[in-house]
């Protein structure tokens, strides 16, 4: 599914980075190998632990520059 980008995340937004992919011999944790690094953003609801919207995108590394791409594209800042 592709976002229309018409409704950016706003309000309380939590962001985390992780990798997609399972265990790889000799590649523990966030070591790349065949794993795909991604960043995830979740817009929280007023209800405790509720999720209103979420988006994710692949990244090349965990730098501010790469993470900033998600902020620029999907999150409305005040």
Image: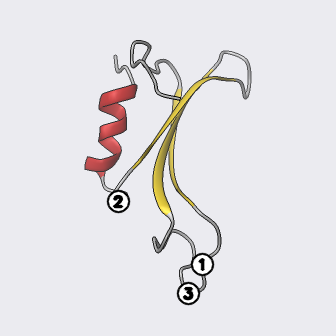
User: Residue 49 location, x and y as percent?
Assistant: 73, 29
Q: Residue at x 51, y 46 (%)?
A: 16
Q: Are marks 3 and 1 in contact (CB under 8 Å)?
A: yes
Q: Which residue is mark 1?
A: 24
Q: Residue at x 42, y 18 (%)?
A: 4
Crowd tier of the residue under label 2, counting other residues whose Cα lies within 10 Å: few below 14, some 14–19, many 20 or above: some
In this rendering, is residue 33 above or below 4? Answer: below
Q: Are marks 1 and 2 in contact (CB under 8 Å)?
A: no
Q: Pick out the residue farthest to the bottom.
A: 26
Residue 61 is labelled as 2
Drawn side of residue 39 relative to residue 44, left or right: left
Q: Which quadrant would residue 77 be assigned to in this image?
A: top left
Q: Which quadrant would residue 60 be assigned to in this image?
A: bottom left
Between tags 1 and 2, which lies in front? 1
Q: For the image shown, how many numbered marks are present on the structure?
A: 3
Crowd tier of the residue under label 3, counting other residues whose Cα lies within 10 Å: few below 14, some 14–19, many 20 or above: few
Drawn side of residue 48 relative to residue 53, left or right: right
Give the alpha-carbon distance from disc 3 to disc 1, as whole Å: 6 Å
Give the mark, 1 or 2, whose residue is nearer the N terminus: 1
Give the alpha-carbon distance from disc 1 to disc 2, as whole Å: 18 Å
Q: Residue at x 31, y 55 (%)?
A: 63
User: Residue 54 location, x and y as percent?
Assistant: 56, 29
Q: Pick out the residue farthest to the front.
A: 1
User: Residue 35 location, x and y as percent?
Assistant: 51, 65
Residue 26 is labelled as 3
In this rendering, is residue 14 above or below 61? Answer: above
Work out whether residue 4 or residue 13 is closer to the camera in this orientation and state it: 4
């Amino acid at each position: 599914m592709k976002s229309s980008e018409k409704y950016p995340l706003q309000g309380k937004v939590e962001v985390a980075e992780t990798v997609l992919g399972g265990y790889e011999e000799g590649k523990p944790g966030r070591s790349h190998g065949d794993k795909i690094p991604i960043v995830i953003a979740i817009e929280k609801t007023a209800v405790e632990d509720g999720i209103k919207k979420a988006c994710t995108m692949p990244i090349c590394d965990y730098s501010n520059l790469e993470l900033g791409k998600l902020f620029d594209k999907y999150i409305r800042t005040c």
